[in-house]
Image (tube, helix red, strand yellow):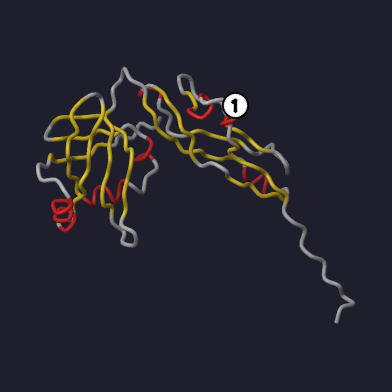
Amino acid sequence: MSNETYTFNAELRTATGTGASRRLRREDKVPAILYGADKEAASLTFEHKEIIKAQESEGFYTHILTLDIAGEKVEAILKDIQRHPFKPKITHLDFQRVDAAHKLHTKVPVHFIGEDVVTKAGNTVVHQLTEIEITCLPKSLPEFVEVDVAGLVAGDSIHISDVKLPAGVSSVDLAKGADHDQSIVTIKANKAAPVEDEAAE
């Protein structure tokens, strides 16, 4: 887990609905909702420039974030982010409160290492999954899961069950049964380049 801190200032909002959200976006603000931990949902507002910068970092999606709501610090994770279909704008955010005693249900990114070794050997690395769905207590939340493909050859693959998850972290898919053990990455041989027939006209 990175030591970098993700803290964001938020304002409580009382006006809700499509019209209110549209006005906020015109003011360069992002409407959001905070829910979970058996507490009433809270409608929030963030500065768009702060969020647009934060969303460029992978940690924004994987870290436990601190929301400063009128001086009250609330820990949460990002559950959903909505973007404008063609403008570089964030239109809505969903956050879930973090309770130290209750497990989180979220997704963490997969970082693949050793891909250069595979490609130099004339093979292609095909990513089947780029995220793994997990459950864990907040203190055990990993920033990412690492998968080493350096020793693989054409025809090899790595499944969720082959990945060693950190202590206290469980795969949601594997908990459903062996038939949910999805492939994360597969190695395919590059097709040989066609040989030109010098005798051909």
- Taking the view exactly as shown, the residue that stands out farthest to the left is 14
Location of residue 195 with respect to 35 vertically, above or below = below
**Counting other residues with Cα less than 10 Å from the Cα at mark 1, is it few (<14), some (14-19), or many (20 or more)?**
few
- The residue positioned 82% from the left and 66% from the top of the image is 195
Residue 96 at x, y = what percent? Answer: 28, 32
Seen from the viewer's position, the closer of residues 156 and 2 is: 156
Location of residue 48 with respect to 174 vertically, above or below = below
- Taking the view exactly as shown, the residue that stands out farthest to the top is 101
Q: Which quadrant of the rendered structure holds the N terminus?
A: top left
- Taking the view exactly as shown, the residue that stands out farthest to the bottom is 201
- The residue positioned 76% from the left and 62% from the top of the image is 193
- The residue positioned 30% from the left and 57% from the top of the image is 84
Residue 114 at x, y = what percent? Answer: 62, 41
Location of residue 22 with respect to 63 vertically, above or below = below
Label 1 sits on residue: 178
Seen from the viewer's position, the closer of residues 133 and 2 is: 133
The kind of residue tagged 1 is Ala
- The residue positioned 72% from the left and 42% from the top of the image is 155
Residue 134 at x, y = what percent? Answer: 45, 29
Q: Which quadrant of the rendered structure holds the C terminus?
A: bottom right
- Secondary structure, mark 1, is helix
- Report the number of numbered marks: 1
Q: Left or right: where does residue 177 sit relative to residue 17?
A: right
Residue 17 at x, y = what percent? Answer: 16, 48
Image-quadrant location for residue 101: top left
